[in-house]
Amino acid sequence: MSRIIRVFIRESPSQLGEEIILPENESIHISRVLRMQKGDKLEALDGQGRRFSAECLEINRSKVRVRILGIDQIMPALPEIRMVIALGKGNKWEELIRPLTELGVSQLIPLITDRTEGVFESGKLADKKERWQKIAQEACKQSGNTWMPKFDDPIHFEDQLTKVEKEENCWMGSLRTDAIKLSPSPACKQLSIYIGPEGGWSLKEEENARKCGFDFFTLGDHVLRVDTAAVCALAVARNCML
């Protein structure tokens, strides 16, 4: 099976035969790194569920023009799964974006908890979110996922609880003795999975989550790192929906 070359585009073509110029960064990669030729085929994604098959018409060092040959609208996977994950030290949050995007997460919410380690620099948030978007785009191109996840601003746990909707199905990873296997109902339309910090949730946070109707889940007897727990939880949840 030949490799599928995918690119991200900013504006979505509306009709077959339409010709578009790819973004400069994609054009440079195609011409200088992949060394594609006139007549080669590729796929273009817009991050909103649309996938375009295209043919290269013109390839210069920083400009690639393509013709749209096909348009597919891919419906988002249901239920929509949002991951609410405690921020950690270093680049742990960014390292999660790629695998979670590949698995089809619909929304990523960075969480500030009682035991969150490190300090989040809010002044650099715009730059950080731009980087998150780029990481997610690369993950979509690699995996073929046509839907980009949405990124929320960091939020404190107590403030996040005020946004929980009545029909929302919320599961919290926990070391509680009454935690059960992650088994959301296949009928739910919106699922939220909460992953705590390395030090675990505080008793107050777990009690407030219980009052909001959260279910507590475990992924086994071993204590998992945040990144391991987040990826495993999303994979298990997706499998429950098959």
Image (spheres, rainbow, N blue to C red):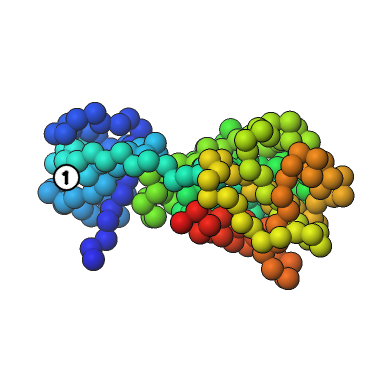
| Residue 73, x across and y down, in percent | 30, 39
Question: Disc 1 marks which amino acid?
Answer: Glu
Q: In the image, 16: left or right of 12?
A: left
Seen in the picture, residue 50 relative to 172 is either above or below; the reply is above
Kindly tell me whether residue 159 is visible in this rendering: yes
Say which quarter of the image contains residue 183: bottom right
Q: How many labels does the image show?
A: 1
Q: Mark 1 points at which residue?
A: 55
| Residue 127, x across and y down, in percent | 57, 36
Residue at the location (39% across, 55% down)? 143
Residue at the location (42% across, 42% down)? 76
The N terminus lies in quadrant: bottom left
Say which quarter of the image contains residue 107: top right
Give the farthest residue toward the bottom. 221
| Residue 9, x across and y down, in percent | 33, 37
Seen in the picture, residue 87 relative to 13 is either above or below; the reply is below
Frontmost residue, 116 versus 123: 116
Seen in the picture, residue 58 relative to 102 is either above or below; the reply is above
Residue at the location (72% across, 70% down)? 222
Residue at the location (70% across, 65% down)? 224
Kindly tell me whether residue 84 is visible in this rendering: no
Element on which disc 1 rests = strand
Crowd band around label 1 with a 10 angstrom C-alpha radius: few (<14), some (14–19), many (20+):
many
| Residue 85, x across and y down, in percent | 67, 48
Frontmost residue, 144 versus 161: 161
Q: In the image, 54: left or right of 156?
A: left
Q: In the image, 184: left or right of 50?
A: right
Frontmost residue, 197 versus 9: 197
